[in-house]
Every structure is written in structure tokens, then in C-alpha cells.
Amino acid sequence: MSRSSVKLDTIDLKILRELQADASLPLTDLADRVGVSQTPCWRRVQKLEAAGIIRKRVTLLDRAQLNVGVTVFIAVRTNKHSVEWLETFARAVQDIPEIVDFYRMSGEIDYLLKAHVPDIGSYDALYKKLISKVELTDVTSMFAMQELKSTTEIPLQFANAGPLGAAGA
């Protein structure tokens, strides 16, 4: 089932909202919260999974308790813009578990990475590992002083608006 063929109704959106808040919710509780019985609720969850809207279910961990409480944003500029270079860079990033997010950007920064490390020394080791695998023109590191908001929840109010947002619907 392709994404374009899935039209989400209010029950689907309620299911997604509840599962984003707590993916470990028992089916009975989920069905009660969204106002349907268990079997239709389970079918809807399966439909959302088959459509790829629910990609996977994960457990969120406390970074500080696992000794990776330092968040660093790494802005990368390069003068290399070939597909081969990008593939090499992407492989290098995939091999570094401390890097949790990786984006190709528009504007003055070519790539933005987010990493979690225990301390600055650990970041320095990550940096050396990265530059040993790929040539970079400029790297700027920014350490988060305080996390003010962090969520994995996707805003659902735009779900049925189409690819151009509300104006394109």
C-alpha cells in the first residue's frame, strides 16, 4: 500500500498520537483511548504499519544515565559535491554510532550532524574518526548548553494536507 493511497481519519490520527506518546501501550488501552474495539484498532495499526506510516517502535533511553549527556551539533562544509564523495561521507557517518542525526542542508552549511557523547574528549575522538574517513573543508562544532525541547513526536495536523501542505490540498 503506497502512502498516497492512505487517507487518515480521526481514529487513525488518534492511534498515531497515542502510539507516539507511548508505543508500549497495550492494545486494550489503545483501543479504549481512541474509542474503538480491539480488533478494528489492531487492523488499523497493521494498516498504518503496512503503509509505512508507522516505521518502527522504539524505546527512548535517558542519555545522562547512560553517560552520553553531551549533545553536539556538527556543521560541515565541503568543496566536494560528487555522488561518490557523498556516498563515502554517508558510509563514514553510518559507522559512527555517536552520530544520531545526519542531514544534507541548503544554505551555507552542507551537512548538519547531531551526536551524543560523554564529554569533549569523546567528541574529539569522534571528530578524528570522521576526518580520517573523509575529507572535509570546514567543521564547526556547537555544544548544547541546555536541552529546552526534544521530542520524537511528529506533528499530525498536516497529515492529510498533501505534499504541498494546506495550500496544496
Image (cartoon, rainbow, N blue to C red):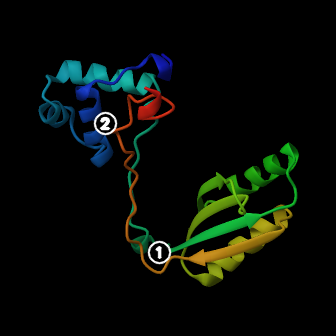
Classify 10 Å Cα crowding around label 2: few (below 14), some (14-19), many (20 and above). Answer: many
Q: Report the disc number at residue 69.
A: 1
Q: Earlier in the sequence, mark 2 or mark 1?
A: 2
Q: Is residue 89 above or below residue 20?
A: below
Q: Is residue 81 above or below residue 66?
A: above
Q: Position of residue 144 (x, y in %)?
A: 51, 76
**Quarter of the rendering occupied by the C terminus:** top left
Q: Nearer the viewer, mark 2 or mark 1?
A: 2
Q: Identify the amino acid type marked 2.
A: Leu
**In this rendering, does residue 30 appear at all?**
yes
Between the C-alphas of marks 2 and 1, the distance is: 29 Å
Total marks shown come to 2
Quadrant assignment, res 65? bottom left
Q: Is residue 112 above or below residue 6?
A: below
**In this rendering, does residue 98 appear at all?**
no
Question: What residue lies at 26% left-to-right and 23% top-to-bottom?
Answer: 42
Question: What residue lies at 85% left-to-right and 51% top-to-bottom?
Answer: 81
The residue labelled by disc 2 is 16
Quadrant assignment, res 9? top left
Question: What residue lies at 24% left-to-right and 34% top-to-bottom?
Answer: 14
Q: Is residue 108 left or right of residue 159?
A: right
SS of the residue under disc 2: helix
Classify 10 Å Cα crowding around label 1: few (below 14), some (14-19), many (20 and above). Answer: some
Q: Identify the amino acid type marked 1.
A: Gly
